[in-house]
Image (cartoon, helix red, strand yellow):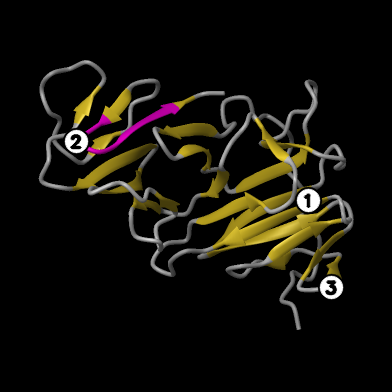
Amino acid sequence: MMSSFSRRIVPSKPDRMMQRPKILWIDGVGGFAMCDASEISLGQSFPSNEIDLAIRSDLSRRAAIFRRSGDGHWIQPFQAVSIRGAQIERATLLADGDLLDFGNRLLLRYKRPTKLSGTGRLEIASQHRWQPSLSGALLLGESCILGADPSSHIHCPNWGAKIVLFRHQDDWMVRVLSSSPVFVGNNPEPISAPFPIPLGQRVHGDDFSMTLATR
């Protein structure tokens, strides 16, 4: 039987402009929405729709919200959504591999690559696109792993380095598990980790390069 809250989640008021997810662009891998708020909205992509995650699909204006609670994520649907063959009407705890069917219009897959972190990943499993065009969306817990190991939250198959992003107060910090030097932007001097991930500046090493950017 599916776990669910006994009442519906009431979405907070949209004062979201400063909290909209940033995008982590990784050379040779793709772009990922970095959703670090406790509540993330999902809906149809059109210019006036102020939501966190937009998809080019026949969705409702506000199709669902995802909420981080403890070490997991819950989905509250605002249109028809089925999980594991059953339509849900209340907030439901997501499990690794769950396929979310939005009224036979859109399929999303929820992945939880490792139990050592509360971060989950959303991927489109149907013929639709994120807006802007992305490889996926990360529902962030306290840390996020990037690397060649398939259990990473972002699988970077050609990397020798392993990178851990983790929360520290209001910042996201970068820890690089590699003996190779790491650089930020055009600064020729290597930077010592951990360090706050800079906005709009390339973080790069011998075999990786990534940039955190606004939309």
Residue 21 vertical placement versus 81 (above, below): above
Question: How far is mark 1 from mark 2, CA to CA?
Answer: 46 Å
How far across and how far down the image is residue 86, in percent?
A: 84, 73
Q: In the image, which residues are magenta? A: 204-212
Q: Nearer the viewer, residue 211 or 13?
A: 211
Figure check: 154 above or below 8: above
Q: Secondary structure at mark 3?
A: strand
Q: Nearer the viewer, mark 3 or mark 1?
A: 3
Name the residue located 39 percent from the left edge and 20 percent from the top edge: 200
Which residue does the image show at 44% across and 70% down from the upper left?
115
Name the amino acid, label 1: Val
Label at residue 55: none
- The label shown at residue 206 is 2
The residue shown at (19%, 35%) is 206
Which disc number belongs to residue 86?
3
Q: Earlier in the sequence, mark 1 or mark 2?
A: 1
Residue 189 pos. (x, y %): 10, 22
Label 1: which residue? 10
What amino acid is labelled 3 in the image?
Answer: Ala
Quarter of image, res 186: top left
Q: Is residue 125 left or right of residue 82?
A: left
Which quadrant holds the N terminus? Answer: bottom right
**Image location (x, y in percent) of residue 66:** 67, 52
